[in-house]
Image: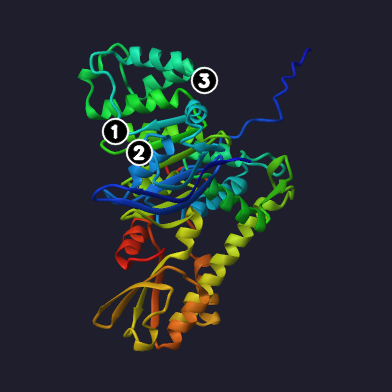
Amino acid sequence: MTAALALSGVTKRYDSFALQDITLDMPQGQIMGLVGVNGAGKTTLLRILSGLARADSGTVEVLGHAMPAQQVAVKKELGFASEDMRLYKSQTLRWHMDFIRAIYPGWDEAYAADLLRRFDLRPEQTLAGFSHGQRVKALLLLNFARRPKLLLLDEPTTGLDPVARDEVLQALADILRDDARSVLFSSHNTRDIEQLADTISFVHQGRLLASKDKESFLDDWRRIICQGTWPAEAHGWPEIAMTRQNGSLLELRVRQFSDGLVGRLQAQGLEIRSAEAMSLEDIFVTTVRAGGAA
Amino acid sequence: MHTVHIKYAQWVAVSAELFLSTTDSTPMYQQIVDQITAKVIAGDWKPGQALPSIRELASASRVSVITVKRAYADLMLAGIIVTRHGMGSFVAESSDLPTDLLRAEFTQHFDALLACAARLGITRNEIRHMLDDEQAAPTPDTSGGSTP
């Protein structure tokens, strides 16, 4: 099985920002969520994968083709939706649909009609009259209806109202029925990612902090509340990402939870009150604050 | 007299949609395990019946493929479903499965009750008395409606 994408040692420098040494693989048939704050490098990464930007060094492979050398072959099977993509304001959505259909033979008109209805868009309206949310939905429609093998979506749910967001998530869920299709999407909304992604990748300040399958992410991390004082001997335990003390209460954020760890904490005289799973958002924020790997 | 036999397809497509909540503190895979178990207990999904494929259930319930994979693995370990290579997953072929699952649930509640009683210092004898009292008291009628 070919990988949907494979990056190795990818670096890209701009004046004020650099994407550094990104190595990342994604098997076909997966949905991967890219999590990062503004300016973390998510868009740059997606632009390199789509062939819109060229890496300074490292290798990039998309759907088994080397990029950017074989980008013509890749683009037939690749969809990329990003907010900074321009649509023609004076033309209607129908005009855009016909334009895309003329270029891509995989265009599925019945699916496009279904998406028009679900996204609540009017094909005869010119793009100038579209709201921000409608433009985002139009761009997603133009990409989804081509049924590309790999979809790169930059913040597909940002700025959408709750109903539109729900429809976009539904359209993404439809895609995962097909094990030959893959999606890489970035989002501020970790809940969207937590729900649909198989793999999660954290990007921060141009670096890849972690990339793991979602279930192990959620399994490994715990928030533990104990009674007692954090002992000096325990400083530097690699499993502990963060500690907070308030009176006799101690909160631990643990990146590698295990029964063994519980035993060691108890041996330090700590009484464990609770050990709860953490949300992806908490895990991400803790990872960034702890300044290390997840 | 002519009787018309209508043959219904044995292969009734099961709905792959589960009702999952992103705000529930129960992990998503556990919600899937719980709901499938409940469907088997209720008889919605019968022994031997084919389960939706992992991708189908993921798509219909809007949850990631890896989460459904994990739930199916747990259900397999628990003996609730079986997976046949290349054919997908099926509800386990034991006819006692719904009863067994219900019994397991009862045992769990029973053990929890004993543990709670121990913490409160309630003796076995006191529990026995409680059971006797409960039996003597008029039990609420659950068989019919509650028309006054």
Give the residue type at disc 3.
Gly
Callout 3 crowding tier (Cα within 10 Å): few <14, some 14–19, many ≥20: some
Mark 3 or mark 2, earlier in chain? 3
- Distance of label 3 from label 2 (alpha carbons): 22 Å
Image: A116 above or below A163: above
Q: Residues within 10 Å of mark 1 (few under 14, many from 20)?
A: some
Residue A206: percent from the left, percent from the top?
34, 53
Q: Quadrant of the C terminus of chain B?
A: top left
The residue indicated by pointer 3 is: A106
The chain carrying label 2 is A
Residue B120 % position (x, y): 43, 80
Q: Which comes sooner in the sequence, label 3 or label 1?
A: 1
Q: Quadrant of residue A86?
A: top left
Q: Nearer the viewer, residue A208 or B145?
A: A208
In the rendered image, the vertical position of residue A141 relative to residue A21, given as above or below: above
Residue kind at label 1, given as amino acid type: Glu
Q: Residue A39: which disc?
A: none
Q: Is residue B26 visible?
A: no
The amino acid type of the residue labelled 2 equals: Asp
Secondary structure found at label 2: strand
Same chain for labels 1 and 2? Say yes or no: yes
- For the residues bearing labels 1 and 2, Cβ distance under 8 angstroms: yes
How dense is the environment of label 2, judged by Cα within 10 Å: few (below 14), some, or many (20 and up)?
many
Return the residue at label 2: A154
Which of the pair B120/B126 is nearer the observer?
A: B120
- Position of residue B2 in the picture relative to residue A274 (left or right): right
- First reached walking from the N terminus: tag 1 or tag 2: 1
Is A144 in front, or is A70?
Answer: A70
Please tell me whether residue A100 is drawn above or below residue B43 in the rendered image. Answer: above
Which residue matches tag 1? A83
